[in-house]
Amino acid sequence: MHIEHIDEHFNNRNVTEMNSDYYLVGIEDYPTDNWGRFKRVIKRSFRGELFVGLWVVMREMIRFDIHTVKYPEEKMPIGPRYRAIHQMKRLWESDAERCIGCGLCEKICISNCIRIETKLDASSRKEVSEYSINLGRCIFCGYCAEVCPELAITHGGEYENASDQREHFTMYQDMLTPLDMMRAGTQLEFEGFGSITPHEDERVKKTPLAY
Amino acid sequence: MNKLINFKIDGISVEAQRGETILTVARKNGIYIPTMCYISKTSPCASCRMCVVEAEGVEGFILSCNTPPTEGVEITTNTAALQNERTNIMKLYDVNHPLECGVCDKSGECDLQNKTLEFSVERQSFSARDQLRPLQHWGLIDYEPSLCIMCEKCVHVCNEVIGDDAIEVKFGGYSSTIIPKNSETLDCTFCGECIAVCPVGALVSSGFKYRANAWELERVPATCAHCSAGCPLEYETRHASLNGADEIFRVKNNFEFASLCGAGRFGFDFDNRALKNENAFNRAIEALKNAKAIRFSSMITNEEAHILELLKDKLGVKLFNEDARKFAEFMKSYSSISSKLHHSGSLDAIKQSDALIVIGSRIATDNPGVRYALTTASKHNGAKIVYAHPMEDTLMQSVITQMMKYEVGTEEGVMALLAHTILKDSDLDESERAFFDELDFGYLYAETNIGEEELSHMMKSFMRAKKRTLIIGNDLIAHDRSSNIAKLAALIEKYSDFSLIVVPREVNTLGVSLINSLDRDEKISDVVGYNAKGDFVISSLEGADLAIPSLNQQEGTFVSIDNRVLPTNVALEFDGYTLNDIANALGIYNKNTIDYTKELNKNSGFKDISFDDLENFLSPLGEDNRGYLLDEVECAADGKLEELDDMPEFNGTIIYQCNPVLQFNNYTFKTAQLPKENFLRGSAQFGVAAKIADGDMVEISYKETKIQRKFKLDSELKGTIALNPTFDISVDASRYRFEKSKIERVMQ
């Protein structure tokens, strides 16, 4: 029953019946004979539609109080949750990289653009030896950031990633928060699973492991 | 005898066979009882106590894993008290367990993780002082004691199934750990079965550690391509490096029921990488057109063997494969007495036997699958195992109950003595009886060095046995008198309750011997080698004129020692040409190699089943659903026993062609992780006889072969026979594996 209802809506393309705000655009009939076609050419050529457009540009140019952003000199501020080129975060307490190499971002990536390589490092810890995102394929869906158990990968605000290469990669080191930024305390932090919760200091309790 | 026990689990009426426990019956009937330490192929560890159930009229909880049901008892598996008990056990398991699931290799397939979530253990309500427990490096295996939950699965498997008995529990309450037994570091055959059964990330493969995660790997069910045991395994693949092609990262197996040796587990990277080389392909076609013979190895699938057989008819060439030809001849002689094509035994039959004879094989390294079956029989049935061979094997020491050491070359005499002893009271026909009556026992006892009392001791120990098996190794197949030996073996199978297993040498020796009509190898020119030597070599090994995929890059079937046709799948892609492409170019058309699966030789028992209809899994209760068993084929029983030949004498320095553990052939030699100890190994006595010392470079010469190897003194060996590995050379498989040889020190 429910499905039938949906079917009706999808198949009934006669919008006027469903919503009276719609109206049909009056379109003249197409000319059928050569004389009619000739008249249409004359009409279109000499109506001066070109100058209508030119006038709009001219008017805005001389008005001086324009609202257009002068990109690339000026840029609009973007929201903190904007999904542009990824960033790799560091831990506040140690400046160490947050990524633990679990590979979930690679697994979840629907455009298959993340590749990660891990290995055992000299101190018997798991080391991310290679990490890249193929920006030519990335659709900036944000799944990688969502699945990350450590909040290590997030999206940043850097959206200018035009390239003359189809395969334009970002590497791990380019995405990683620079150390001076960590020292200045300006790493952008998000709330969420894996992040530092507000009032962290008050909430921490001694674990049973304390000696 | 086999009376069923009727009882109830959670109100459901169930039946138990004698010897079954409550847990196995519950599992059979789909009733869930959680366990942490239970593993089907060993006796219950009973260390986790998760499997507790309540029985009506019994005070307290009982362990379902090691308690057999009694008639009419009512079992409850799920009450609040039981749930509470189990939750508390899980809470204790989780005490101080490192919270490193994010990096742990086991994460995603971890029993502890699953059960912790199942019983919703959210916080640690007990505490204990944590202790420093450093990571242990044991070669191919790493042990992380802090992750270990002391379920003891590894110890049980190592002892009861593998037979290495290399690890044990160091008891100490909370500070208990697993330690190598009687050794500083782990000294074992590195089968890695402990890694497989470990429910947490405590025992891991050091080569795999931290390279990938369970959720990233793609599983390809396949069959091990190293020996004829045909163990089931799964190749786990993933891309390697940023732009790299797929690679096999590790091998896993269904450890609940099947086992795998170290070569199968760690020797997976024998794949062949090649691109389409049209030039080489055209030369291969040309070479085949001009060829007089194709020489090939048994490291191929049944389908490839079938294509080669078609090529033989089409091109009129000869087919050389000495290994399979010898095996086929042996089985032909066997059939001429037993009137059937296939031997009767299987690995499962070995596991269930309680009286076994192994003859003519250093079985632990020739076929680990048979060794594990023997260990299982020994530990679970208390099987009496007679090991007849000219050399002792320390790997088999804990399993065998009687060593029957015979002189090199006297296998025919030994078989005659065995047959005579076993068939003493059997209803033989006249000519067969006459054969035994005519035996010169004095001569046989003297030459074989087997005493009458040894044989009677064997018969005495076998007296109460319910199921007996005779296992025949390659020394008998490659023997000059193999035909008569086969007839004697057939006689034992025919007139006694012994089942028989003939161990094929290579992974698909059995399949090839059933599919191909083979010619005796000759030294002629214009031979095309297919995975073997030739004037033009088509091979999946290095140095080939045309590269073809190796066995983990092909789909097809093998015939295992169980006479089972087992499917294997493509783990890694291969970009070059295959044998089917060659056959297509030569006018034998079929789109895919696996289209030949249902065309395989029906006269040998192959069934009309296409490849895609073959299953490849073990059921949750352990039934083997892989491929199919060959049909039994009736043969004419027209064979007659021949009179025994004079026993050959082997004096001086003798070498035995035998690989060390973890090595089988040129393919295992290719792999990165397996140790490649290509030394001539011999005892101190051998060193004295050959006038060589430990570490000397020696030249070994026999027949026309000369090999240079380093000599290594092995304190575990005795006598004047040294072991010469063959995995890094190519050997004439038709030759008897003991060789009289000349050994000289090479000056450096």
Image: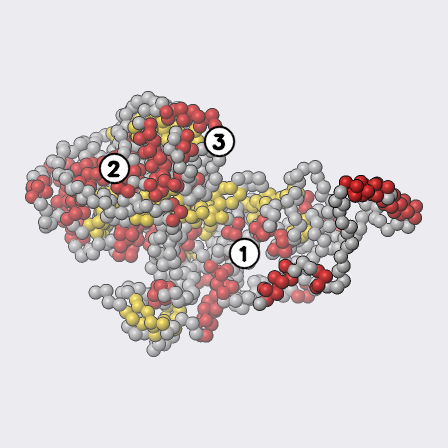
Residue B298 x, y percent position in the rendering: 33, 36
Looking at this view, is B524 or B178 the one in front? Answer: B524
The answer to the question of whether label 1 and label 3 lie on touching residues, with beta carbons closer than 8 A, is: no
Q: Say which residue label 3 marks.
A: B276
Distance between the Cα atoms at labels 2 and 1?
53 Å
Q: Is mark 2 on a helix, strand or loop?
A: helix
In the drawing, does residue A182 fall left or right of residue B192?
right
- As drawn, A35 above or below B48: above
Which callout, 1 or 3, points to the residue nearer the camera?
3
Which residue is rendered at x = 45% and y = 33% of the image? B577
Question: Count of labels shown?
Answer: 3
Which quadrant would the C terminus of chain B be assigned to in this image?
Answer: top left
Tell me, yes or no, if residue A18 can be seen here.
Answer: yes
In the rendered structure, the answer to whether residue A141 lies left or right of residue B135 reads right
Looking at this view, is B608 or B713 the one in front?
A: B608
Mark nearer the N terminus (1 vs 3): 1
**What is the chain identity of the residue bearing mark 2?**
B
Badge 2 is on which residue? B328
Q: The N terminus of chain B is located in which quarter?
A: bottom left
Residue, disc 1: B101
Task: Give the residue drawn at x 32%, y 34%.
Answer: B309
Q: From this viewpoint, is residue B674 visible?
A: no
In this rendering, which labeled residue sits more in front, label 2 or label 3? 3
Name above or below for residue B602 compared with residue A192.
above
Give the Cα distance between marks 1 and 3.
43 Å
Task: Give the quadrant of residue A197.
Answer: bottom right
